Amino acid sequence: MIPGAQMQRLVPVSEDARLDRFGLVVARGALFRGLPPSVLEDLTRRLQVRSRLAGAVLVAESDPGDAMFLIHQGKARVTLLGENGRELILSQLGPGDFFGEMSLLDGRPRSANVVAEEDMTLLVLTRDAFAEHLRAHPQTALNLLAELSLRLRRADETIADLALHDVHQRLVRTLERLAREDGEEQEGGLLLRRRPTQQDLANMVGSCRETISRTFTSLIKQGLMVPRGRSLLLTRRLLAA
Ligand code: CMP
């Protein structure tokens, strides 16, 4: 169980969320990308809308799985917990992303926890609905395989990172990846908007907050990173190194 997390509490779904449930956000997600309208319609017809509050455990590691989820609104993180309660963040998910498909595909318990970081609207596809859709529209399975390949590539990168790079390098690589996903090029370098907390960064790179804090201080002292409120400028010198 995840300490301090609220178990799934239902909040009322607004009519807006219901009306907008086939909206572009989801249609652009990895599962739907490039699918013809008929396939999209078949899939969306089978979805149910659910709302969850920030902090809710959407999926708990080792539980049996009977549904998968598409994120319509909000952000979530995929985590594993060590025996000492230390959290490792495997991935962060946002609108258009999906999760919970692995247990449906291999019939095994949930492989990880998925925790809501914000209030969320989810589109739920039950095991039976998922299987029926895939039998009728194998195109969706190709999208699913492409996304699973992408995740395997990322997991390979993470393994290489852990084996080949020290904490300093892992931190800089993670900040750069985050800035490329949600940031902007500026004259002085790459601006990372909404810098994660040092604890979250530690959980992403497999280190502890104290080490991340020391590395941060040293990079800032050397002028390689410049904090700007909640944002962080990664200088060209840092990125080139
Ligand atoms: P499932 O095992 O059913 O429940 C936990 C979910 O977390 C899993 O399906 C995936 O959807 C998701 N998940 C597990 N590992 C990763 C990862 N490395 N990257 C992104 N998502 C993941």
Image (spheres, helix red, strand yellow):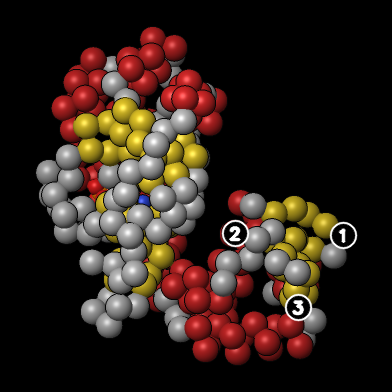
Q: Is mark 3 on a helix, strand or loop?
A: loop
Amino acid carrying mark 1 in the image:
Glu
Q: Name the foreground residue: 207 vs 163.
A: 207
* 169 relative to 235 in the view: left or right: left
Q: Position of residue 147 (x, y in %)?
A: 39, 40
Q: Is mark 2 on a helix, strand or loop?
A: helix
* 215 relative to 225 in the view: left or right: left
Q: Is residue 73 visible?
A: yes
Mark with earlier residue (3, 2): 2
Mark with earlier residue (3, 1): 1
Say the numbered circle drawn on residue 176: none
Answer with the quarter of the image where residue 230 lies: bottom right
Q: What residue did someone put label 3 on? A: 224
As drawn, 139 above or below 231: above
Q: Position of residue 206 (x, y in %)?
A: 42, 76
As drawn, 125 above or below 227: above
Using the numbered discs, state the Cα–Cα distance from disc 3 to disc 1 in whole angstroms: 14 Å
As drawn, 195 above or below 123: below
Residue plotted at (39% across, 36% down): 12
Q: Position of residue 173 (x, y in %)?
A: 58, 68
Mark with earlier residue (2, 1): 2
Residue plotted at (23% across, 79% down): 83
User: Are discs 2 and 1 less than 8 Å apart at CB?
Assistant: no
Residue plotted at (32% across, 49% down): 9
Say the numbered circle drawn on residue 187: 1
Amino acid carrying mark 3 in the image:
Leu
Q: What residue did someone put label 2 on? A: 178
